Image: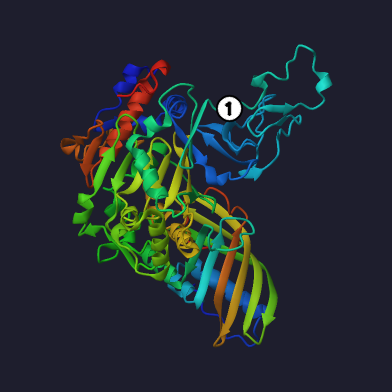
Amino acid sequence: MRYDPEVIRSLVHRDHVHRSLYLDSELFDLEMEKVFGRTWVYVGHDSLVPKPGDYITTRIGKQPVVLSRHSDGKIYVIYNSCGHRGAIVCNDDRGNVPLFRCCYHGWTFKTNGDLDAVAMPRGYGKNFDLSDPSLGMGRVPRVEVYRGFVFASLAPNGPSLEEHLGQAKDSIDELVDRAPHDEIDLSAGVHKYMFRGNWKMQIENVVDMYHVPFSHESTIRRSGRQFGRRSGEDSSSEISDRGQAAVRWEERAAWGSRSNGHSFSGHQPVAEQIPDDPVFKSYLKSLEARHGAERARQVLQPKRHNTAFYPNMTLQALNQHVRVIFPVAVDRTEVHVYPVQLKGAPDEMNRGFVHHLNVTHSASSLIQTDDLECFRRLQAGLQAQGSDWVWFARGVETDKEDERGDYVNNGTVEVQQRAQYAAWLRLMTEDDADVGSGR
Amino acid sequence: MSVQAAEPIAVLGDQRSIEDFLIYEAQLLDERRFEEWRDLFAEDGHYWVPLKLEQASPEGEPSLFYDDRRMMETRFERLRHPNIHSQNPPHRTCHLVGNVVVENVDTKRGECWVRSNMIMTDYRLRTQRLFSGRVRHHLRGDSGSYKIVLKRVDLINCDDVFELIAVPF
């Protein structure tokens, strides 16, 4: 094999990685096997399948899967492929059915993936065992749910979801704690965009605070502030001071786990403001009723802006959304963005979240489109062979380690990306037997 | 040649005046006269492109566009920014308006409802795309012309995965 562990190790250094990581389809196939095919991957949210028989279709890496709620009330992640000849069984994005039925020869499956019945069973001989589990759609080996977020792993063994999430788990808590009923709902709908670039560009980008004054220059007014991103706010955080990142920007926390690849950037200054309007006050009241005044105040002071759950999901606190990354090919990526509704918050407030996300993260939005253009130029520019490397050196001398051995730093550093590539290297070079053995 | 504003309307909801207005509106977009396009909207006017077939409301469900005039202002201010990377080079667009049907005219309120079909091709960097959809205009007669109360565009691929979009449909 061309990419044995030794070759792969030569491609990834602490502060730079080889351009082939974005260009070589052989490496892409290996990522589907070693990264998406083994580690915990976000597959969906339980609010998308509230009732028995509810299902959504999605993918883990390139493999089609179904996330369903079975009649036992539990969530299952099953392969979206008929146990007979292999056709896609569930053809819709989502639905509710008593049984899944294949279009080709009419085999039916329970909503946990088990074979229910075959058409014209007398045509099968005595030796053909219809109770053989391998004739079902097949279940993904491991599924775990954390506060509604459903993750699955295609590897039968490995660390638990909790171990895998590590400190990134707190970002889920930070978001869900903001819901007076302690649950969020992702069922409002979804924005979907596509770019002609490698999937890693997206996961690098969400926690990249260095690009903001430049990529998003067109969203920054002469005052250095961005346009208003929340209900009732005319303008947003100060981003730029004559082409430099604003001072507060450099104080923001930066964190990355080099064992698991998760990372976050600290909260935007504007997130500290408590809006002074009646809708927000009634929200505050219900939060205080739930948590008490002091805890409610804490909940409203999020510490994190974007968190990237390696390899395929990101959360944002300011324009609340869950983003899911789908690698399609080495140079093609699809992204789905779900607005987050806080259960128990005033309808008007939840409507405001949806409304602002149209403007910040849709395919026609004012912010996301800047990133999409940069991704396109990245993929095109990387074809040049003037250099072999892509650099993530910003702040490497000032990286510190926390008690768990994760990287910490501040501001517009590239520590998050250094953590992502450390985890990438581990996953890409680790034997199946060692998966998750950690750092 | 730049388009001129349509003739003053004599009769509210008259087919010819409606067609003139829709063509004028589309041409303003093709000529990137965005501020003039925005001024075709009433003070309470909205531009809406749903993400779902038969989407009931722009509230509580995401949309590709749901802009009031203030949002349009922010959007077009950005489209005019010298360093808007996604518009270097800009998208070129060509709108085609057809199958125009005046559905309802309420002379008392001075308003009318119009259905049409649209095709928009856009082009940028060796990629040409085709968008098409059903359009509904809710119009209000206003000093000899129309103002848009709501323009709703239902793309036939509204739930597709889109590459970046800059110019309204």
Residue A198 in percent (x, y) is at: 41, 37
| Looking at the image, residue A409 lies above or below residue B97 | above
Residue annotated with mark 1: A139
* Amino acid at the residue labelled 1: Arg
Residue A340 in percent (x, y) is at: 46, 52
| Looking at the image, residue A128 lies above or below residue A370 | above
Q: How crowded is mark 1: few (under 14 residues within 10 Å), some or many (20 or more)?
A: many
Residue B57 in percent (x, y) is at: 58, 63
Residue A124 quadrant? top right
Q: Can residue A388 be seen in this view?
A: no
**Residue shown at the point (29%, 51%) measured from the top left:** A267
| Looking at the image, residue A253 lies above or below residue B53 | above
Circle 1 sits in a helix, a strand or a loop, which is it? Answer: loop
Q: Which chain carries label 1?
A: A
Q: Is residue A14 visible?
A: yes
Q: Which residue is the extreme one toward the left? A: A397
Residue A92 in percent (x, y) is at: 64, 42
Q: Which of A416 and A318 is in front in this view?
A: A318
